[in-house]
Image (cartoon, rainbow, N blue to C red):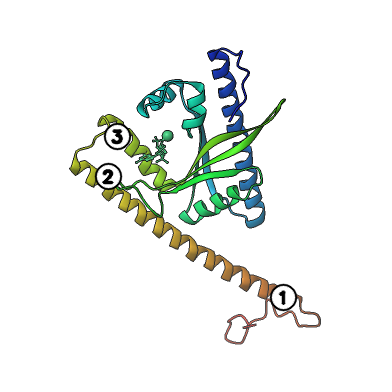
Amino acid sequence: MVYIPKTYDQVDQWNSLMFIYSSALKQMNVKIEVLNSEFVHIYSYNPIEHVKSRLKSPESIVKKLKRLNYEVSTYNMTEKLNDVAGVRIICSFTSDIYQIADMLSRQADITVLYVKDYIKNPKPNGYKSYHMVVTIPVYLTEGPVETKVEIQIRTVAMDFWASLEHKMYYKLGGEAPAYLQQELKACADVVDMLDAKMYSLNEAIMKWNAREEKEKSEEGLADEEPGGRDLSGYETESGKPVDL
Ligand code: GTP
Ligand code: MG
């Protein structure tokens, strides 16, 4: 993906690549921030709770290349690994996930290489998240360099589960006994239920708000009616406000 002069030694190549990956993360973060702000501007609603980004450490890069049986080289790092630069977007509701994924895919400068939808197809352990591997151009003096970024999008509840599961996985040395795996899966089911409940609660609140707004605007219209009598403050004989 990246042109680096061959005369560069390994350290120079490494530093140049890491500079490009970290610039890609910066561009991605700005893009996400702008999209989120525009969304707030239009819909008065903030779909993103928070965003985390990270560059893979040299140790993890070497470990992963070895695990996948690739020679440790800067070439293999850029060609074979898709998560050297990673962004995690945490949002409020499951519906936000697809909206954010859509917004990102529609960006002219973002190319989606592939998607793994672990929400529609959760992993057997219960892991849920929406993954996209994309490229974004980093504009260097010599021209744009398409750079791979892994984007994970999940709800706060899914993130809670994944963070704890990740810690436990390491504590257990990568292999949990069957009964603990079942417990973790049971927790993932609780997370599912929580997400579904929060989603329907939010839908109900939005409907309630819309009804309130409609009633308010109808009252406003009645008050402003040209030539109409201003009945505000009038009461019927029973003491109840006049029904407009
Ligand atoms: P990795 O080699 O782990 O990067 O997996 P992959 O290249 O097959 O990609 P995949 O999209 O399956 O997973 C990418 C990333 O998602 C991982 O590096 C983790 O950050 C996260 N992830 C995937 N599966 C799990 C899981 O079961 N539990 C947790 N906590 N995180 C997961
Ligand atoms: Mg990874």
Relative to 168, is 222 above or below?
A: below
Q: Quadrant of residue 244?
A: bottom right
Q: Earlier in the sequence, mark 1 or mark 3?
A: 3
Classify mark 3: residues with Cα within 10 Å, few (<14), some (14-19) or many (20+). Answer: some
- Which amino acid lies under the numbered mark 3 shown in the image of this protein? Tyr
- Which amino acid lies under the numbered mark 1 shown in the image of this protein? Leu
Q: CA distance from mark 2 to mark 1?
A: 55 Å
- Which amino acid lies under the numbered mark 2 shown in the image of this protein? Leu
Quarter of the image with the N terminus is: top right
Q: As drawn, is 142 to the left or to the right of 11?
A: right
Q: Which residue is mark 3?
A: 169
Q: Quadrant of residue 178?
A: top left
Query: Observer-nearest residue: 180 or 109?
Result: 109
As drawn, the label of residue 184 is 2
Confirm if mark 3 falls within 8 A of ligand 1. yes
As drawn, the label of residue 221 is 1
| Residue 137 x, y percent position in the rendering | 64, 35
- Element assignment for label 3: helix
Query: Observer-nearest residue: 212 or 124?
Result: 124
**Marks 2 & 3, CB-CB < 8 Å contact:** no
Quadrant hosting ligand 2: top left
